[in-house]
Amino acid sequence: MSNKFIIALDQGTTSSRAILFDHQGKIHSVAQKEFAQHYPKAGWVEHDADEIWSSQVSVASEAIARAQLTTKDIDSIGITNQRETTVLWNRKTGKPIHNAIVWQDRRTAEFCQNLVSNGHEETFTAKTGLRLDPYFSGTKITWILDNVKGARELAEAGDLAFGTVDSWLIWNLTGGDLHITDPTNASRTLLFNIHTGEWDQELLDILNIPASVLPVVKESSEIYGTTSGNNLGSQIPIAGIAGDQQAALFGQMCIEPGMIKSTYGTGCFMLINTGDQAITTKNNLLTTVAWKINGKTTYALEGSVFIGGAVVQWLRDELGIIKSSADIEAKAAAVKDSGDVYLVPAFAGLGAPHWDPYARGLIVGITRGTSANHICRAALESICFQVDDVLYAMKSDSEMAIPQMRVDGGATVNNLLMQLQTDILGIPVVRPQVQETTALGAAYLAGLATGFWKDIDEIQSQWAVDREFKPEMSEEDANKKRQRWLKALNRAKQWADD
Ligand SMILES: Nc1ncnc2c1ncn2[C@@H]1O[C@H](COP(=O)(O)OP(=O)(O)O)[C@@H](O)[C@H]1O
Ligand SMILES: O=P(O)(O)OC[C@H](O)CO
C-alpha cells in the first residue's frame, strides 16, 4: 500500500480547490480560493484565465504545505474542471488573448439561433450529442476569433491555442510542453464527434474555426507528462483529466449502466451511465462522454439545471431572508409545507429538459399568510422539482430501471432538501461519506493510470454510504405537487422579451 497521496486540482466556476487523497480515498488536506467573476455586459460572464491558473497553483502548493508534505510525497495529479469555459492563448507568449468566456455566458445566443435557422442543428446534435446553445465552447471560440483584433491571423499562422480549463492548466503545469485535453472535455465543445472520438472537420468549417487551435485528445486516465518545475516542483506525473460532472460520476463509482448521480452545487447536474451506448435523446437531454479508459469509451446522458444551490444564495444575498445558506433548512422546516407557494428559479432561463432562454423566475401562490419560511421551503422544493423533471426525461430516454440516485455537492448537507428530493422523485437518494466526489473522481483517474490503485474493483470497495433518504410522501401527493409545479413552470416560460 502506498503512503503517497494524489492531488486533485478541482477548478470550479467560482473557486479553485486542491485536495490531497490518501490510498483509502480519504481526504488528507484541502485548500480553496475564490476568484473574481466578471460581468462586462448583461448575460456575459468572464474569468481572468491568468487568475484561474494562479489561484489553482497556489491552492495546490497550500494543500501540500498544510499537510506538511513535499512534492516527493505526491504520486500524481488529477485534473477536473468547470467545463465548456473557453480560453484562447498565444502559443509563443503563453498569454491569453482574451478573458476566458465562461459556460454561463449567453453572448452567442443569436449566433446559435442563426445556425439553427440555417438548418445546422441536426448535424451538430447527431455528431456531438449537444444542442446549438451558447453554453458550449464552439461558438465562444468563433466569437473570440471574430472579435479580438489579430486573433484570426494568429490562428491561421498556427500560433493560437484553444483549450477548456483542463488544457489551460496542463499547458501551464508543463511549461507549455503539452497542449492536450480528454474526451469528456472535448465532448462539450460542439467540435468533437463523440462516435468517432475525433475532432470533426465539418463542424469546424461551419463554425469557421481552424483545426490548428485544437488540443490533442488523450484518454481520461493515462500518464500524459510531468510538471515542469516552474511552480509545483518538477516531475510530478499528470495522469487524470475529466470535466467536473463526469469526474463526479466516476467519484461516485457510477460505473455500471443505469447508475445515476446528481450534483447539487450552483446548478444541478444529473448524469446516468449508459455504458458503450451513446443514446440519442428524445427528451432534450445531452449525450456526452463519461470517460475513456484503456481504449474504451463510456457514455452518459446528462441533464443540466442552471440554478440549483444558487437559489439559496439568491435568498441570502438579494432578498436577505436568510443570513447563511445553512439557515434555509431550519426556516423551511418551521412550516409543514410550502403553503401552495411555488418558486421557479429561471433566473438564467431554463436548462434541461426545457431549454428556454427566455424563461424568468417567478413566485406564485402568495397569500396574506405567506411567510419567508414558506418561500424558503418553496425554494428548496424548486431544486427538487427541476431535478425530478430531468429524471423523468432520463427514465424515458434510457429505458433503464433507476432504483436509486447518488447525490453530492455543497447543498446535499441539507437533510430536509434530501428528504424533499426523495419524496418528489419516489426513489431513494443516497449520500456518500466522501462528498468531494468531483475531486475524488479526478484522483481515481490519475491513481488508476499510475498504479497507485490496482484497478476499479479496488476503488469501488472504498465507496461508502453516509445516509440513505427514503420516500415518505405518498405517490398521489407527490403527483399533485408535480402538477402544481408544472403549472407554475409554464407561467415562467417565454417571459423575457429579448
Ligand atoms: N445548507 C445548505 N442548504 C442548501 N443549499 C446550500 C447549503 N449549503 C450550501 N448550499 C448551496 O450549495 C452551493 C455550493 O455548493 P458547491 O458544491 O460548493 O458549488 P459549486 O461547486 O457550484 O461552486 C451554493 O449555491 C450554496 O447556496
Ligand atoms: O464549476 P461547477 O461545479 O459550477 O460546474 C460547472 C459545469 O461543469 C458546467 O457545465
Image (spheres, helix red, strand yellow):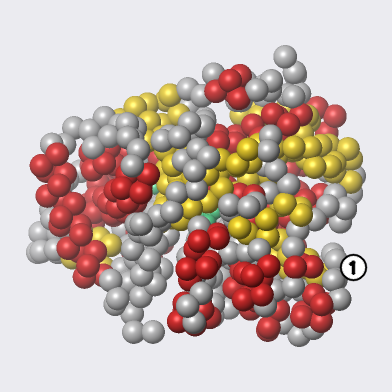
Residue in the foreground of this view, choosing between 23 and 289: 289
Residue 411 is situated, as x and y percent measured from the top left of the image, at 41, 44
Using a 10 Å C-alpha cutoff, classify the residue at mark 1 as few (fewer than 14 neighbours), some (14 to 19) or many (20 or more): few
**Is residue 237 toward the left or the right of residue 480 in the image?**
right
Position of 404 relative to 187 (above/below): above
Q: Is mark 1 within 8 Å of ligand 2?
A: no
Position of 290 relative to 467 (above/below): below
Q: Residue at x 35, y 75 (%)?
A: 358
**Is residue 281 toward the left or the right of residue 44 in the image?**
left
Residue in the foreground of this view, choosing between 208 and 177: 208
Residue in the foreground of this view, choosing between 22 and 282: 282
**Is residue 408 toward the left or the right of residue 444 in the image?**
left
Q: Secondary structure at mark 1?
A: loop
Q: Is residue 84 visible?
A: no
Q: Quadrant of residue 330?
A: top left
Q: Residue at x 36, y 70 (%)?
A: 356
Q: Which residue is mark 1?
A: 92
Residue 89 is situated, as x and y percent measured from the top left of the image, at 78, 68
Q: How many marks?
A: 1
Q: Quadrant of the C terminus?
A: bottom left
Q: Residue at x 53, y 40 (%)?
A: 276
Q: Quadrant of the N terminus?
A: top right
Q: Quadrant of residue 465?
A: top left
Residue 65 is situated, as x and y percent measured from the top left of the image, at 77, 35
Position of 232 relative to 71 (above/below): below
Q: Residue at x 68, y 83 (%)?
A: 146
Q: Quadrant of residue 329?
A: top left
Residue type of the residue flagged with mark 1: Lys
Position of 156 relative to 212 (above/below): below
Q: Is residue 458 visible?
A: yes
